[in-house]
Amino acid sequence: MYGWLVALHLVGLAVFLLAHGVSMWVAFRVRGERDPRVVAALLGLSAHGARVVYLGLALLGVGGLGAAAVAGSLTRPWNVASYVVLTIVLGAMFAIASPYYHGLRSALDGTGGEPPLDEDAMVARLRTRRPELLAAIGGSGIVVLILLMVLKPG
């Protein structure tokens, strides 16, 4: 049973990271675009990738928590620290990315009674360092999680 749960955890991790790579690529790629239709298409691709990210996260969580329960390590300090790190990283990334990208999608579509963004307004909104901030937060979180899993402090 433990082996299957670890395998599920690793499959979830792989799905999560691969699908998340799509959104990361889009975050950096859209800044160089000038065609609102291309930006909208790329943001749509990112939204589809995000759905797969949540599937990977669910598999990762079920497998990881199940394996930890079977191994009797759910409440070990390094595991609890990993729950805290994961929660903080996911919360920060969601709070930084979602309002911006959802708002950009809506502005490109012209929803909410507003006209669609023109090219100049879109380019101005795309001038952001948000992708670097998100990469720094996510990358730091992954490094900390790996260190917790390898070193198992506490």
Image (cartoon, rainbow, N blue to C red):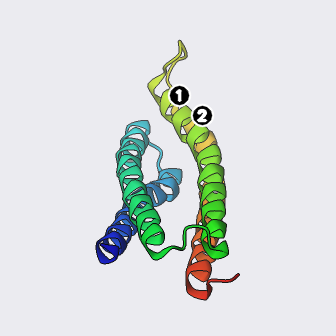
Residue type at tag 1: Ala
Percent from the top left, x then y, of residue 21? 42, 63
Element under disc 2: helix
Which residue in the protein does label 1 denote? Answer: 107
Percent from the top left, x then y, of residue 66? 41, 64
Tell me: residue 120, above or below residue 3. Answer: above
Residue located at (42% from left, 71% from top): 70
Callout in the foreground (2, 1): 1
In the displayed orientation, state which residue is furthest to the top. 113
Residue 41 picture quarter: top left
Q: In which quarter of the image is the C terminus?
A: bottom right
Percent from the top left, x then y, of residue 40? 41, 38
Which residue in the protein does label 2 denote? Answer: 121
- In-image side of 114 versus 71 (left or right): right
Q: How many labels does the image show?
A: 2
Residue located at (47% from left, 45% from top): 34
Are discs 2 and 1 less than 8 Å apart at CB? Answer: yes
Q: Pick whichever, 150 or 91, lies toward us.
A: 150
Residue 134 picture quarter: bottom right
Q: Can residue 14 be seen in this view?
A: yes
Residue located at (63% from left, 58% from top): 89
The disc label shown at residue 8, or none: none
